[in-house]
Image: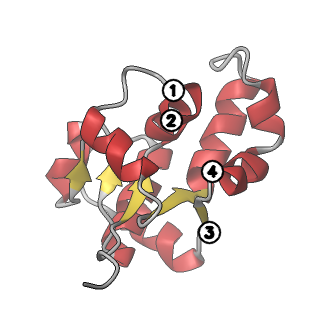
């Protein structure tokens, strides 16, 4: 028997934050998938942007260490950085529907482009045909 097939997945920003905080809000299936070293877990540059922005405006109090070294936190967890390309931005901007959150729209675009399930509690991803792991 060979090595099990790895799951590739993209963390929603809240899933990344809950993982780092060891929060009970993270579902057990999500926790198992993230913890499995055979799986490839990605964090989008859009999530880094969201974390830094929310910290700056006071919506993530106490996240100073994270907000100042998001890349370091991603690397220490063994996660991959997923950059935002112009094509990703274009796709996010052209997505249909009323959903206005630019961070979620980018995650949707990247999940669709790279065929990645998103680890998220947010059922809004389902409306865009994105596979969701929760």
Residue at the image point whose x is 58% and y is 33% from the top: 20
| Residue 8 falls in image quadrant | bottom left
Q: Earlier in the sequence, mark 4 or mark 1?
A: 1
Mark sitting on residue 77: 4
Q: Which residue is drawn at 42% across and 50% down?
A: 34
Q: Where is residue 9 in the image (x, y as percent from the top left)?
A: 38, 61
Identify the secondary structure beneath mark 1: loop
Q: Quadrant of the N terminus?
A: bottom left
How would you rate the neighbour count of disc 4 (Cα within 10 Å): few for under 14, some for 14-19, many for 20 or more? Answer: few
Badge 4 marks a residue whose secondary structure is loop
As drawn, is 63 to the left or to the right of 129? right
- The alpha-carbon separation of the residues under discs 3 and 1 comes to 25 Å
Q: Earlier in the sequence, mark 4 or mark 2?
A: 2
Q: Contact, CB < 8 Å: mark 3 with mark 2?
A: no
Mark 1 sits on what residue?
22
Which residue is more in the foreground, 72 or 35?
35
Q: In which quarter of the image is the C terminus?
A: top left
Residue 97 visible to the viewer? no
The residue that disc 2 covers is 19
Mark 3 lies on residue: 83
Task: Tell us which disc is closer to us: 4 or 3.
Answer: 4
Q: Nearer the viewer, mark 3 or mark 2?
A: 2
Report the disc number at residue 70: none
- Circles 2, 1 touching at the beta carbon (< 8 Å): yes
Q: Marks 2 and 1, Cα distance to the nearest angstrom?
A: 5 Å
User: To which quarter of the image does residue 79 belong?
Assistant: bottom right
Whole-percent x, y for residue 72 in the image: 78, 50
Residue 16 seen in this snapshot: yes
Q: Are marks 4 and 2 in contact (CB under 8 Å)?
A: yes
């Amino acid at each position: 028997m060979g090595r099990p097939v790895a799951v590739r997945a993209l963390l929603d920003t809240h899933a990344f934050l809950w993982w780092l905080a060891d929060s009970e809000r993270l579902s057990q299936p999500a926790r198992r998938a993230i913890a499995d070293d055979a799986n490839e877990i990605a964090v989008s540059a859009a999530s880094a942007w969201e974390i830094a922005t929310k910290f700056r405006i006071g919506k993530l109090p106490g996240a100073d260490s994270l907000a100042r070294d998001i890349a370091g936190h991603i690397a220490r967890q063994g996660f991959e950085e997923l950059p935002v390309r112009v094509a990703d931005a274009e796709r996010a901007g052209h997505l249909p529907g009323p959903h206005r959150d630019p961070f979620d729209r980018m995650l949707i675009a990247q999940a669709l482009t790279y065929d990645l399930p998103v680890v998220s509690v947010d059922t809004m991803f389902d409306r865009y045909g994105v596979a969701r792991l929760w």
